[in-house]
Amino acid sequence: MAETKILKPRPYARLLTMIGDQLIKNEKIALLELIKNSYDADANWVQIRFNNFELDKDDNNKLIAKPDSSIEIEDDGIGMELSVIEEAWLNPATPNKYLKKRKGNNRTDKERIIQGEKGIGRFAVYKLGSKIEITTKPISQKEPEINILNDLSQFDDEIITKEKNDKPTFLDQIEFTCQIQSKPQYFKRRQILFLGKKRSRPPHGTRILISSLKGDWTIEKIETIFKELNKLKTPFGDKKDKSEFEFDIKINNKSYFKKDSFKDEFEQIIEKAPIRITNGKYENKKKLFSFYQNGSKRELKLESFFENKEIKDRFLDKNGNLKRNPESGSFGFTFYVFDFRPKAPEKYKLTSEKAFVKNNRIYLFRDDIRVQPYGNPDDDWLGIDVKRGTAKAGDFLSNDQTMGHISISVINNPKLKDKTNREGLIEIGNAFQDFTIIIRGFLGYLLQEFRKYKTVQERQKKLDILEKNTISNQLDLFKEHLENKNDKQGLKYANEIIKNYQNERDYLIERAEFTEDLAAVGITVEAASHDLMLMVERAKDKIDYLAKHGTSPKFDKIELKDGLEQLRGQITIIEDQIRGIQPIFRSSRRVSKKHRIKDIIESVRKYYDSNLGKNEIKFEVKEIGPPLVAKCSEAFLLQTFINLLDNSYYWLTTIDNKPKVIKASLDGNKLVAFFSDNGPGVKEDDAEYIFEPFFSTKGIDGRGLGLYIARQLLERADFKIEYVTKKNDKILSGANFKIDFSTE
């Protein structure tokens, strides 16, 4: 007969080492965890004291720990009752705070959001030392003062065995000595020195004294912790938690550090950001971003970022329909984008402030308390540096030129959970990936806005130079000066300089046009390549089939003939496609003759026929009056309409509208052509920038060259292209372009 036994787990004592010493990454994280416990205890202040350290004589930065050295953490919080110590503090993974949060009771008496929930942060003491003494006094006068002592220094490093004892120790064999003082010995009302000033110490709180210390300490390391503490609570925007929470660090009873000026520096430097996004909120149910941009209120729907490949792949199905909502939840945000260029306008130029921006990136705060290590200069939690490395760097804002914060909460973001080691958020599941991809999508919008800002600045500089005719005027003044001085030799050199300048200018203009032509060829070949590659693959398959079976005596000659005819047809299609592209090549561009615009558009249409059909996009060409004819290089016209059709096709694939329509309206009387679609159109704020080089609203999918090249080519033929903004002048509801051929 089988015997049944009930087995119960009994953890070993080394669990304390694994939680405290091994799971917590470093001393900084350990101290921050203990300080967050003070925050949860509604403390107004917490003081960290490094006691009885010796300063290294050879290195004034190094601190030498002696046998009586200790680290002391004291606060004026609500303290702990004996029942809390017995039922919660002593037991790893205590669910007390978690259960309170689950019941909706996630705030302290001071309306602070409770930070801890895993029930292991307090064991960070074992990262700092092996001997722990805790003195605590609840806020109620009736409650006694409690002193707890735990000494693990008598065990080996893994808390497995005691000295001279090879038997493994279980967790329930670890002893804490507890003294209950009805008359408080430590927590008495008295004066303490805090941040160099006297203040009254109330008769309640918690003091943790850690000795038998581990790790090495330097003044620089402690200063880093002090600076991190200054970033513990968000300096960004409005804070729900208005209660005071201060901290002080002392070394050998001396205050080494003044209160950090992070917040003051931050408030000063943000004025130098040309793009300032404040009071930002993303509402997950509405999928809506609302924010203030340089003081002006704006709103953007998540669907406006669906052109972003990452967001499209993440949330849309094959047909472009939303397949699921983001799981990350709603969040707040603030961003400041800086201009690091030496030629930045004086108002935004950075000098010594660059270091501050580079050292403070995009922070994450949960319920106004920072999530480590996000925001540190060496942490790329949003994956921006990775993306800049794997894609074009210019498709993303530099990580070190953007400063700001994201704010989440336990209530709105329940699936965004801290890692057990307190080093960021758990990255498993959809929530974290959804979260970072949505943020990167918005950062793509900021890149677009930054490009607009640069475009305006550069355009203004060019206009100033052109309006003033700066170089020509300077050269004329130089010649005039030499003539007045009767400097014939100098005048000779000046004329040579002017001649060389004109030649160099003409050469650079020619090279710029040559580069534009090459870019135009590339875009055209890309448009035609899909069908070309498809035909090449089919032709290769047919050749392979005929080579394999054609030499067989049993192979049917009729089948061979049919196969060869099919192959000839495929090669003919490839020939036609290449012949259609040839007018784009630079060697063909010099030929200028009259072309019927409808024929040009029909030629362009062939490149897109299969894609248009696959996406159910209807393409209409309508002629009004006599045929619209324009005299110029065929390449200019082909390239213009390829770019217009390519843009319309792209944007129509990002929306769910049906029917999807592209329409070319050709007016032979007025010599104008309208090219329109019923896609999302161009945002009002973007309209003046779309013809600028490298400006794109397609995110990482866009080069920002198509419309720029189209305009440059048309201007060479004295034609004009413009984006139609007036509603009454539009043919269809989306993007509408007007090409004027009357200026020939």
Image (tube, grey):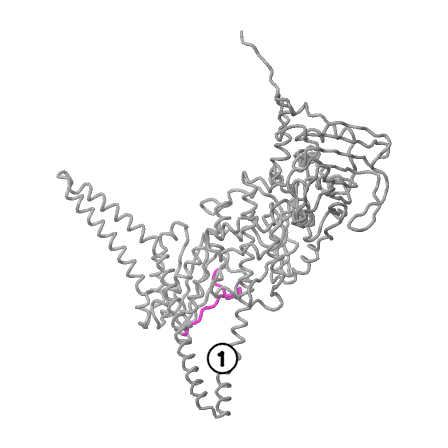
Residue 542 % position (x, y) = 24, 46
Badge 1 local density, few (<14 within 10 Å), some, or many (20+)?
few
| Residue ID at (19%, 48%) | 564
Residue 233 % position (x, y) = 69, 48
Could you tell me if residue 40 is visible in this image? yes
Q: Quadrant of residue 502?
A: bottom left
Helix, strand or loop at label 1? It is helix
Q: Which residue is mark 1?
A: 471
Residue 717 % position (x, y) = 39, 73
Residue 227 % position (x, y) = 68, 50
Q: 704 or 297: nearer the eye?
A: 704
Q: Is residue 72 left or right of residue 470?
A: right
| Residue ID at (36%, 69%) | 627
Q: 661 or 164: nearer the eye?
A: 164
Q: 684 or 705: nearer the eye?
A: 705
Range of the magenta residues?
A: 718-732
Number of dots carrying numbers:
1
Q: Quadrant of residue 490?
A: bottom left
| Three-letter code for the amino acid on which mark 1 is drawn | Ile
| Residue ID at (42%, 87%) | 492
